Image (cartoon, rainbow, N blue to C red):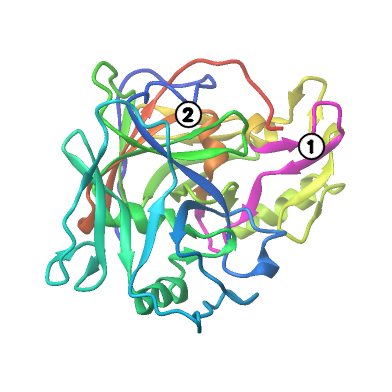
């Protein structure tokens, strides 16, 4: 797999930025908790695109689909749960043909309805056979707990166009945006990525440099993931924090927050040739509530040396547009837009 260096514009970035603007034109898909099995719901921090199934599906606790015995269903309708639909972006019907191929489905697996935005077409409704539903489930593209959802990376890999991540009224209401290009905004810098991977020349964490690191942008995971040695070192530097069943560190907020300021150890800085991206500890620490002293580090083990990933907690600090210019080529142009906001905690 090849990785790309960042092409940067403008001044070094040293602030914390707004995660919503400038992406106002488009529509959004709800992202909900996603697990392949009922047992995985408790510890699952993964998110999938909410879909509405008709007729409803039944499945076992192990995530296997249970085929209805009483009725024969030729097709199952699967529709993205869209919200904030603005004027001018109404769904465009697509004729269903069992002889035509419409990615990602072909023959009896077809896109049934699309939304056209800025010359890009996003499939928002499908008619699926039982065989293909089983295939999607067994390959990890559909999750059924606690409700049915689609893998966001699978969806983005099949449909070219601009995407972004934002939040609803609360931090735990992430949304995937299907967007037009911002007409008046110019990105502060751009990254050419392959399968959401890119190379960072100098990555600073624990107040020391780690050179030549590979970083992946993940829209479906909450946490930032660090290489195994770094993850173990967190336990050494903050010994009062212990690892929970979900693979994250838990402890008292006063151990990582001194007064109003969190420890600099948890600041993560990605340095490039002409710019840098700062992820402050504010966005890597989750407080249970304003008055609580219980904190969780939104950091997990990547299980691979020199590999890091940025989860959706990162999008509380940055407005990012991900342009899958050619979904078939698996390449992306990731554009960063900076908007000043005050530092804030995750609640």
Give the x, y percent position of residue 256.
79, 34
Pick the front one: 299 or 345: 345
Say if the magenta span includes residue 298.
yes
Is disc 2 placed on a helix, strand or loop? Answer: loop
Q: Position of residue 217 (x, y in %)?
A: 44, 47
Tell me the number on the disc at residue 318.
Answer: 2
Q: Are marks 2 and 1 in contact (CB under 8 Å)?
A: no
Which quadrant holds the C terminus? top right
Q: Position of residue 301 (x, y in %)?
A: 62, 57
Toward the left, the furthest residue is 99
- Answer with left or right where residue 143 lies relative to residue 243: left
Q: Residues within 10 Å of mark 1 (few under 14, many from 20)?
A: some
Label number found at residue 259: none
What's the magenta region? 284-308
Asked if the magenta segment contains residue 299, the reply would be yes
Neighbour tally class for label 2: few under 14, some 14-19, many 20 plus, Cα within 10 Å: many
């Amino acid at each position: 797999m090849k990785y790309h260096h960042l092409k940067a514009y403008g001044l070094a970035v040293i602030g914390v930025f707004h995660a919503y603007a400038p992406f106002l034109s488009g529509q959004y898909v709800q992202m909900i908790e996603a697990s392949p099995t009922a047992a995985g719901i408790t510890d699952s921090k993964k998110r999938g695109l909410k879909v509405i199934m008709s007729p409803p599906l039944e499945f076992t606790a192990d995530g296997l689909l249970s085929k209805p015995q009483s009725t024969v269903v030729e097709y199952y309708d699967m529709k993205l749960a869209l919200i904030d639909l603005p004027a001018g972006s109404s769904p465009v019907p697509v004729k269903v043909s069992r002889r035509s191929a419409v990615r990602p489905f072909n023959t009896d697996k077809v896109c049934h309805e699309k939304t056209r935005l800025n010359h890009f077409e996003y499939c928002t409704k499908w008619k699926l056979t039982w065989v293909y539903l089983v295939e999607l489930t067994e390959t990890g593209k559909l999750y059924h707990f606690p409700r049915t959802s689609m893998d966001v990376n699978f969806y983005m890999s099949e449909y070219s166009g601009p995407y972004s991540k934002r939040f609803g009224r609360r931090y735990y209401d992430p949304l995937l945006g299907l967007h037009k290009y911002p007409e008046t905004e110019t990105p502060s810098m751009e990254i050419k990525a392959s399968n959401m991977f890119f190379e960072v020349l100098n990555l600073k964490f624990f107040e020391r440099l780690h050179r030549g690191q590979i970083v992946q942008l993940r829209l479906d995971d909450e946490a930032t993931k660090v290489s195994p040695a770094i993850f173990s070192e967190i336990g050494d530097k903050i010994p009062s924090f212990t690892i929970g069943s979900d693979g994250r560190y838990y402890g008292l907020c006063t151990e990582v927050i001194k007064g109003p300021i969190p420890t600099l150890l948890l600041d993560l800085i990605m340095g490039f040739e002409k710019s840098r991206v700062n992820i402050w500890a504010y966005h890597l620490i989750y407080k249970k509530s304003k008055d609580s002293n219980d904190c969780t580090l939104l950091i997990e083990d990547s299980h691979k040396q020199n590999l890091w990933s940025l989860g959706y907690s990162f999008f509380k600090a940055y407005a990012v547009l991900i342009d899958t210019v050619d979904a078939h080529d698996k390449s992306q142009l990731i554009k960063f837009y900076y908007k000043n906001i005050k530092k804030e905690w995750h609640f």
